[in-house]
Amino acid sequence: MTKYDLLEKQREFMEIPHNESLDVAIYQGGYGSGKTWCGALLGILLARKYPGCRGLVGAKEYELVRKTTLVSYFDHLEMLAYRPGIHYTYNKAEKIIKFKNGSEILFCGLDNPEKIKSLNLHWAEIEEASQVSDGVFKQLLGRLRNTYRQKDWIDFRYRLFGHTNPQPDKGWIYERFVEKPHSNYRLIQAPTTSNIYLPKHFIESMQESFDKDYYKINVLGEFGDYSSGLVVKGFSKANIKSLKYNSELPLHITCDFNVDPMCWCFAHKDESNVYFFDELVLEKTTTKQCIEEFTRRYPAHKSEIVINGDASGDNRSTQSEYTNYAIIKNVLTDYGYTNVKFRLRDYNPPIQNRIAAFNARVCNARSEPHLFIDKRCKWLLYNIYNLKYKEGSRIVDVPTITRIKHEYTLKYLEHPFDAASYLVEYYWRIKGG
C-alpha cells in the first residue's frame, strides 16, 4: 500500500486550521519544493473523500497544465490505483478525469475568464498562480458554489488552492495574502531547502549558479524586488504617509483628461517635497463633472488653487470656453474660487522624462524620499505597484482593450500615474532629460 510522508510545509498546505466554509491557500515555493506534486495529491484526495464532487485544475495556458500538472495527477493515480475510490477514466477530448465514485476533475487554460463562467465547482486548483490575473482568481472564487453534497460530507469546505514560484513584482498574491489577507486566506512559503529528499548537490549547484536575488526568489521562495520591471522604482513604506489636507496651503490639482476613467490628483508641495493627499478617479465622465466634484470635497479652500496637468488641455493659446482648463477656470469662478493659477508646460514632455522626474522624487541617490502618498489615493498606488514596461524594453505596457475586458481593473493603469507625473515633472524636471 502506498504511503506518503509529507514535508512539514506540504502538510500545512493540505490541512485547514480554521472553521470557515471556504479555504483559500497558496503554496509558494522554490524549485523542487514539491508544489505541483502537492497540489495534484490534494486534488485527488478531495475527489476521493467527497464522492460526486467537481473540481477544476487550470493554468494561464493549457499547455502548462498538460505538460506538468496533468502528468503529476497521472503519477499519483498510478501509485494509488489499488486504493478504494481511485478507479478512474480520462477523456482526452473533454480534458476530464471521471472517478468511479462520481467525482470529476476538469483541466483547462485560464487565459480567458469567460470560459469558466458557467461552471459550479466544489474546489479549484491554479498551477503557477502568479501567472494568472486577479480577474481569473475572482472568477474562480465565484465558481465555488456547487450545492450538491452527499450526506457523509460532514466536514466539507469549499477550497481554492494554488502553487507558484514567487514573482519579482507586487501582484495580486502579495496584495491578497500579505497586505490585506482575510482570516481564511493562507500563504505557505516553502524554500527548496525544506525538501529533505532532494540530493545535496541540487541545492549546492543553485548556490553556485544563481545571483543573490534570483536565489532568494527561486530557491528560498521569498518575495523579490517588487520594482523589477516596474515603471516606478524604489517606492517603499517610507513613501506612504497619513496626509491631511490644509486649507491654508496652496492646493494643486493635476489632471489627466482621459474620459474613462478621468484621473486627477490633489497635492500640497514645498520646495523639495510633494504630498498627494487625495485623488479623483471617475468613469465615463466630463471635465465639468470632475471639477464640480472637487468643489464638493473642498468647498472652503482659503489659499490659492494651482492647476497642473496634461498640456493638451491647455487654455492659454485660445479663449475658447470649451477647452478643459477653461471649463475648470469657469466652474471654479462660478463657485467663488478666485485665486486660481495655471502652471502648465507648452507641450507634454516625453513619458520617460516624467518617469525619471517621478522616480527621483520617490527616492534619490541618497535614499531620501521626497514624494509621499496617502492610502486614500488607491488608484495612484495601484499604478505604482503594477504599471510595468514591456518585457525587454523601456516602453510602458499599456493594457489593451482585450486585456481590460478580461480584467476590469486594468483600465485604471497609466492615467493616475500620468496625472501625478505631470505635476512632478513640471516642478522637478530632470535637466537634460
Image (cartoon, rainbow, N blue to C red):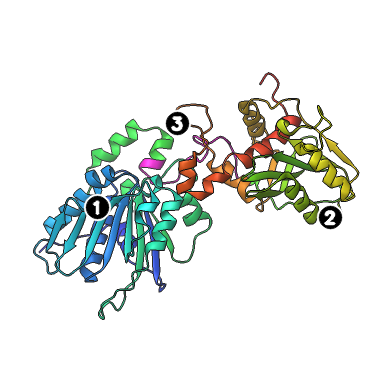
Say few, some or many: other residues with alpha carbon within 10 Å of mark 1 (under 14 / 14 to 19 / 20 or more).
Answer: some
The amino acid type found where label 1 is placed reads Trp
Instruction: Please give the name of the residue rendered at 45% of the width and 51% of the height, measured from the top-left corner.
Output: 134
Instruction: Please give the name of the residue rendered at 25% of the width and 39% of the height, measured from the top-left corner.
Output: 202
The amino acid type found where label 3 is placed reads Glu
Tag 2–tag 3 contact (CB < 8 Å): no
Instruction: Please give the name of the residue rendered at 71% of the width and 21% of the height, measured from the top-left corner.
Output: 431
Residue 226 among those drawn in magenta: yes
User: Which residues are drawn in magenta?
Assistant: 217-237
Indicate left or right for 398 with 416 as reference: left
Cα–Cα span, label 1 and label 2: 60 Å
Q: Position of residue 67 (x, y in %)?
A: 22, 43
The residue tagged 3 is 391
Cα–Cα span, label 2 and label 3: 45 Å
Q: Position of residue 157 (x, y in %)?
A: 35, 71
Position of residue 54 relative to residue 267, above or below, is below
Query: Splitting the image into 4 quarters, where does residue 21 fall?
Result: bottom left
The residue tagged 1 is 37
Of discs 2 and 3, which sits in the foreground? 2
Cα–Cα span, label 1 and label 3: 30 Å
Count of picture labels: 3
Tag 1–tag 3 contact (CB < 8 Å): no
Q: Position of residue 424 (x, y in %)?
A: 71, 34
Of discs 1 and 3, which sits in the foreground? 3
Say few, some or many: other residues with alpha carbon within 10 Å of mark 2 (under 14 / 14 to 19 / 20 or more).
Answer: some
